[in-house]
Amino acid sequence: MNTPIKTLIALFFTLPLGALVSEAATLTGPIVNPSNAHTYYLLSQNTWTGSEAEALTLGGHLATINDAAENLWVLNTFSLFGGTAKTLWIGLNDSANEGTFVWSSGESAPYRNWSGSEPSAGSSAEDYVHIYDLQRGTFTGKWNDFANGTSEFGVPLHGVVEIVPEPSSAFLLISGVAFCLRRRTLRT
């Protein structure tokens, strides 16, 4: 093996993972969706993988869209933030298994809002899903699977992070006590 290749291999294995994925910055947030009490952030322009990596550092994932109301809220809240159109990365992807779309959060939300002929079955490079911005006419709010880029037809791609609140310790304690009391009552 020649020396330049050895050097590249050594460099690859010594670089921190963050050096291989560009970091996204938070543009706005936290913003709480009043209908589900989840917290959201809008990230700077980045790839899907870069946005998901940043979402993890914030304690969440790219957004899991559970229904039409949440899709509309995310679209209206973030796609024109700062006065410029933004196409929005969400957590849906088929990067592990072509044609099998899953949420990066691991949730099993069945809601889909595909645009016309999407998802594109013909391209294995289009593994990541975004929501078209508010200035896309009939495509507005619809979903498209796309390559791991930072813009689509000149419109920047921005990740939307969703953080689902953990049940509080007090709630868990009260639920546990209530369960024990109920069980005790049923035995007597």
Image (cartoon, rainbow, N blue to C red):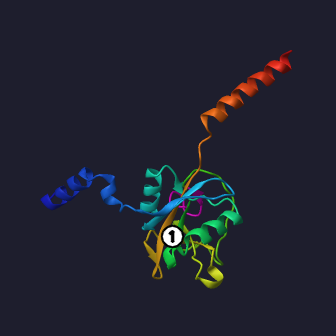
Q: Is 36 displayed left or right of 145 in the figure?
A: right
Closer to the camera in the image, 101 or 163: 163
Q: Is 39 displayed left or right of 28 in the figure?
A: right
The quadrant in which the N terminus is found is bottom left
The quadrant in which the C terminus is found is top right
Q: Which residues are magenta?
A: 93-103
The x, y position of residue 21, in whole percent, is 36, 60
The x, y position of residue 150, in whole percent, is 43, 72
The amino acid on which the numbered mark 1 sits, given as a three-letter code, is: Glu
> Does 141 appear above or below 159?
below
Q: Is 89 displayed left or right of 109 in the figure?
A: left
Q: Residue at x 51, y 75 (%)?
A: 86
* Majority secondary structure in the magenta region: loop
Q: Residue at x 30, y 58 (%)?
A: 19
The residue at the far bottom in this view is 137
The answer to if 100 sits in the magenta stretch is yes
> Could you say which quadrant of the image residue 22 lies in?
bottom left
> Does 115 appear above or below 188?
below
Name the element at disc 1. Answer: loop
The answer to if 7 sits in the magenta stretch is no
Q: Residue at x 61, y 38 (%)?
A: 168
The x, y position of residue 8, in whole percent, is 21, 59
- Reading the image, the residue beneath label 1 is 126
Q: Is residue 65 visible?
A: yes
Q: Is residue 125 visible?
A: no
